[in-house]
Image (cartoon, rainbow, N blue to C red):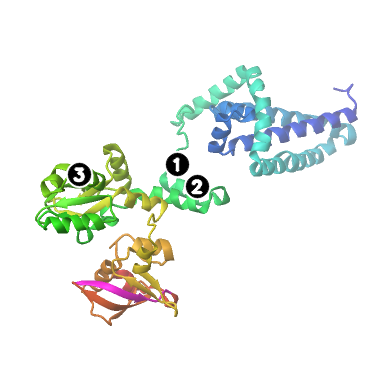
Amino acid sequence: MSEISTTTLFVILGLLIVLSAFFSGSETALMTLNRYRLKHKAKAGHPGAVRASRLLLRPDRLIGLILLGNNFVNILASSLATIIALRLGGEGAIAIAAGLLTLVILIFAEVAPKTLAALKPERLAFPAAFVYTPLLKLLYPIVWLVNGLANGLLKSFGVSPEDMDGQALSKEELRTVVLEAGAMIPRKHQRMLLNILDLEKAQVEQIMIPRNEVEGIELEEPIEEILQQLENSPYTRLPVFEDGIDHIVGILHMRKVMHALTHGELTKQVIRKICDPPYYIPEGTSLNTQLLNFQRKKQRVGLVVDEYGDVLGLLTLVDLLEEIVGEFSTDPSDSVQEVQPQEEGSFLVAGSASVKDLVRTFHWELPTDGPRTINGLIIDYMETIPEPGTSLLLHGYPVEILQTQDNAVRMIRIQPDRRRPPSKADSDS
């Protein structure tokens, strides 16, 4: 070592600090890589991503290799700094050299490269993977020995490097990923993804058409009225029942009706014959389960029944898909009839309007885990059927009952621009 000039030692010391920075930065970069983005790039054939992915299959070996190299260059740098200090200032300069080297390594070989690697992990991780892949093969015996001792110590504490969790995300974590995706996912697609995650939180009775609103064919009616109803119906499938909706005959497809009409007179007997068997859905079924059931059983319409077999309502595949992608209706008069904005800022809302649709369209802060309609929400809140002219504060929104009929609220006026924070009494009720 005495034959090497001081200038050469300074150059070697500088190279060791650069190597230390490389080891420190590449360690942070490889460990902070987005695993899902890495898998995507590796599947696409990105060379750096493929090598980095292979290295991260056994992170214990990778960390062992990096720390082996980093500690080696740091210790060697410390030794060279001691030799340089002895040459320049004697034994009294060793402490100064140690302090300066610690400061230099801390700034240039630790903080700066690790911060850069945390901000731009792929920029450093992928090139580093080309270095570590052959280096791991070259130094494998030493790395194996170091890892063997370290893993043996970990196993004594009940930790094994072979037990990899795969970093699976929970639904709430996945929701956070979608929300934080920002501009990478269009807002409309973001809402769809969140709606898919919310499917298991809702049940079929929350989005079904209630039994009193189900349009169907009553075989007790005269055939003339049935034919007129079929002619004016906007639906492609209609339930057929006899002596009330709880006695379902089947589901009638309009295509079969047209076929029957072209081949002769349509009678009640023919209607019974061409009906498809009814498909029943137990109440309490979650929406994600029912979506899979519709697909598995190749059905588009189902009748929701309670534990006694009584029909609660009707659910269609379109209703389910609307929970994901939004309203399908192509008739603007539907929404106009249910919600009518007024010039002074209030809204006239039909009692049958869906609470979920109002929240989704107007962003009103109404509870969606209870009654599905405004009528149900008001009756649940007041615990009685209000008279016309009654005013109330519904979850902070001033509401006036305009019309009631047949034991239900038919029309209200709501003033969202005058909303007040709900009181404790509101939340308790």
Residue 339: x percent and y percent? 37, 69
Residue 239 marker: none
- Between the C-alphas of marks 2 and 1, the distance is 9 Å
Above or below 396: residue 327: above
Mostly what secondary structure, the magenta segment?
strand
Q: Secondary structure at mark 3?
A: helix
The residue under label 2 is 177
Q: Residue at x 35, y 63 (%)?
A: 334
Disc 2 vs disc 1: which is toward the camera?
A: 2
The residue under label 1 is 169
What kind of residue is marked 2?
A: Val
Left or right of 295 on screen, residue 126: right
Disc 3 vs disc 1: which is toward the camera?
A: 3
- Between the C-alphas of marks 2 and 3, the distance is 53 Å
Pick the quarter of the image with the N terminus: top right
Q: Earlier in the sequence, mark 2 or mark 3?
A: 2
Q: Earlier in the sequence, mark 3 or mark 1?
A: 1
What kind of residue is marked 1?
A: Leu
Q: Nearer the viewer, residue 47 or 55?
A: 47
Above or below 146: residue 254: below
Q: Residue at x 71, y 33 (%)?
A: 22
- Magenta-colored span: 407-416
Above or below 193: residue 340: below
What kind of residue is marked 3?
A: Ala
